[in-house]
Amino acid sequence: MKKCMMKDNALGYGNIKMLGLVGIYIIALVLGILFRIYGGSAGILLSGMVFYVLPLTWTLIKMKTEKIPFQLWTAKVNKSTWYDSFFVAIFFIGISVAFILIEAMLFKEGQIEYVKVSWQKIIVLAALAPITEELICRGLILQSFVNKYPIKKAVWLSAIIFYVIHLNIFNILAIFVGLMFAVLMIRHCNIYMTMAIHFFWNLILQLKPLLINLLHNVSSNVCLYMLMVCFIMIIVGVIKSIQQYTFIVKEYCE
């Protein structure tokens, strides 16, 4: 039985009420919608900022009042951390680029009108979202569940909550994403790694219009080769993630 750093943190996480977080998200959602409707050209930026900054602020205040140090989730990065993070990262790069490649191959230039790359969305979704979602889902919520439940249950519950806060019932991939990030966090207890992977994943998605335009100038054969590489990356990432999940469930204290 190996040592689980998150499991060893005997702090007052039971005092963190998830109902309070739900209330904050509802308020943030309502304010975000209002800013999106009435915010004019800055509506996207304002709505995104309030949706992510408000829950983040609430989380930081709770961490301070409950005396939960951020350092609990910033363990030293070693070779094993880089190794496991690499395979999680190639999964996200592979699946993101694969979807973009397929879309570029199916639709020729001009068939679909893409919204241009938005610097506002990059700030909100590539910068703010990873920080807020990781600190809340892989920090506060996962830590709370790990202290209350067995590792397996804690991982799945945090993944489901990660799926719910994305407000898209069709985005089932979010559950798998939540699982992979939770496993990586429990095994290595370094939230910077999950934030970094989350950032690059969201950035690729926000650069989609630019990437599709570039791919329209690439031959179909090259796109097919690139797609094959992406599929290999996805398969390898999934296999390694399953291995990591099995490892933490069997080896870490329950």
Image (cartoon, rainbow, N blue to C red):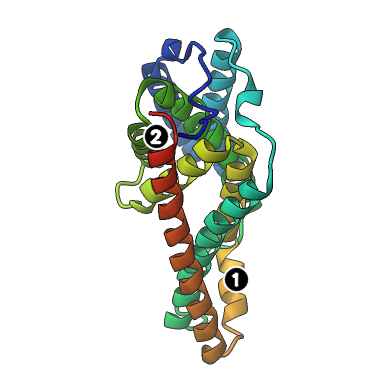
Q: Few, some or many C-alpha atoms within 10 Å of disc 2 (few <14, some 14-19, many ≥20)?
A: many
Is residue 232 shown above or below 120?
below
Look at the image and tell me whether residue 104 can be seen. no
Question: Where the N terminus falls, by quadrant?
Answer: top left
| Label whose residue precedes the other's in the sequence (1 or 2) | 2
Q: Where is residue 84 drawn, in percent x and y? A: 57, 52
Question: Where the C terminus falls, by quadrant?
Answer: top left
**Residue 158's disc number:** 2
Hey, what amino acid is under mark 2? Ser
Q: Few, some or many C-alpha atoms within 10 Å of disc 1 (few <14, some 14-19, many ≥20)?
A: some
Hey, what amino acid is under mark 1? Leu
Foreground residue among 111 and 155: 155
**Residue carrying label 1:** 211
Q: Where is residue 177 drawn, in percent x and y? A: 44, 49
Is residue 29 shown above or below 62?
below
Q: Residue at x 46, y 32 (%)?
A: 34
Q: Where is residue 174 drawn, in percent x and y? A: 40, 48
Q: Residue at x 56, y 26 (%)?
A: 56
Q: Where is residue 151 drawn, in percent x and y? A: 39, 33
- Single out the mark in the foreground, 1 or 2: 2
| Residue at the extreme left of the image, as rendered | 169
Q: Residue at x 40, y 15 (%)?
A: 17
Look at the image and tell me whether residue 76 can be seen. yes
Quadrant of the rendered image containing residue 29: top left
User: Disc 1 and disc 2: Cα gap in Å?
Assistant: 32 Å
